Image (tube, grey):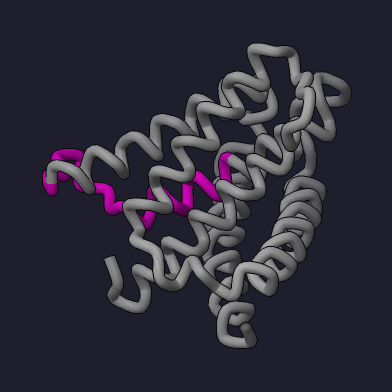
């Protein structure tokens, strides 16, 4: 578990660095997006990963690792949007956006540590393609919850699903860094 924590932090450092740089370049223009639009952006990335995994062909040239990073960052943005909603200014200071990013990183890491303990790091024996499929399944669930105006009867809410997608993406990146597929 200790190694997982270090690997998890290293993945998030890379993601946060990209988020911070893009925030300096673009500001927080993503704040204009509804949560459902962020869900669709995540879907596009996950579907591209699956297509490349199935066909072995990558015509755009961007690698799968970058798409998993994109999923992580879009999920964090979605979590921020769930908290802030349509209230407040669209443009926020870079340090405020990064502080919110770190808040959700820490909450998601805490969830990972709890689940990782209970599941005995089962993800280490999974295929990256299965993690991709789990992300796509979570996206279909999120779309259904969004279509139900956020209401669930017995299921986890949007936030838990975004956090799971983040963790599946981090796990995929860790496995890829270890040369697994």
The vertical placement of 118 against 128, above or below, is below
Q: In the rendered image, which quarter contains the C terminus?
A: bottom left
List the single residue furthest toward the bottom: 2
Residue that appears at 39% across and 64% down: 126
Q: Position of residue 77 (x, y in %)?
A: 66, 39
User: Which of the two residues, 27 or 152, is positioned nearer the viewer here?
Assistant: 152
Q: How many marks?
A: 0
Residue 68 lies within the magenta run = yes
User: Which of the two residues, 28 or 117, is positioned nearer the viewer here?
Assistant: 117
Residue 64 visible here: yes
Residue 78 lies within the magenta run = no
User: Which of the two residues, 180 or 14, is positioned nearer the viewer here?
Assistant: 180
Q: Position of residue 44 (x, y in %)?
A: 39, 30
Q: Which residues are magenta?
A: 56-74
Residue 106 is left or right of residue 142, and the answer is right
Residue that appears at 64% across and 12% down: 147
**Quadrant of the rendered structure where residue 145 is?**
top right
Residue that appears at 58% across and 37% down: 26
The vertical placement of 156 against 168, above or below, is above
List the single residue furthest toward the front: 154
Q: Position of residue 35 (x, y in %)?
A: 66, 25
Residue 33 visible here: no
Residue that appears at 58% across and 71% down: 8
Q: In the rendered image, which quarter contains the N terminus?
A: bottom right
The vertical placement of 157 against 166, above or below, is above
**Quadrant of the rendered structure where residue 154 is?**
top right
Residue 70 is left or right of residue 161, and the answer is left
Q: Position of residue 166 (x, y in %)?
A: 58, 51
Residue 51 is left or right of residue 133, and the answer is left
Residue 53 is left or right of residue 71, and the answer is left
């Amino acid at each position: 578990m200790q190694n997982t924590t270090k690997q998890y932090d290293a993945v998030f450092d890379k993601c946060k660095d990209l988020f911070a740089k893009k925030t300096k370049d673009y500001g927080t223009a993503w704040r204009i997006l509804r949560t459902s639009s962020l869900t669709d952006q995540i879907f596009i990335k996950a579907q591209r990963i699956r297509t490349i995994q199935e066909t072995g062909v990558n015509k755009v040239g961007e690698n799968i690792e970058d798409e998993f990073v994109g999923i992580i960052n879009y999920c964090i943005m979605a979590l921020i949007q769930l908290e802030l909603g349509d209230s407040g200014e669209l443009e926020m200071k870079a340090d405020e956006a990064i502080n919110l990013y770190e808040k959700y990183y820490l909450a998601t890491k805490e969830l990972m540590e709890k689940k990782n303990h209970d599941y005995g790091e089962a993800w280490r024996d999974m295929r990256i393609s299965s993690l991709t499929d789990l992300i796509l399944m979570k996206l279909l669930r999120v779309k259904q919850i969004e279509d139900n105006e956020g209401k669930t009867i017995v299921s986890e809410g949007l936030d838990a699903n975004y956090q799971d997608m983040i963790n599946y993406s981090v796990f995929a990146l860790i496995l890829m860094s270890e040369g697994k597929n």
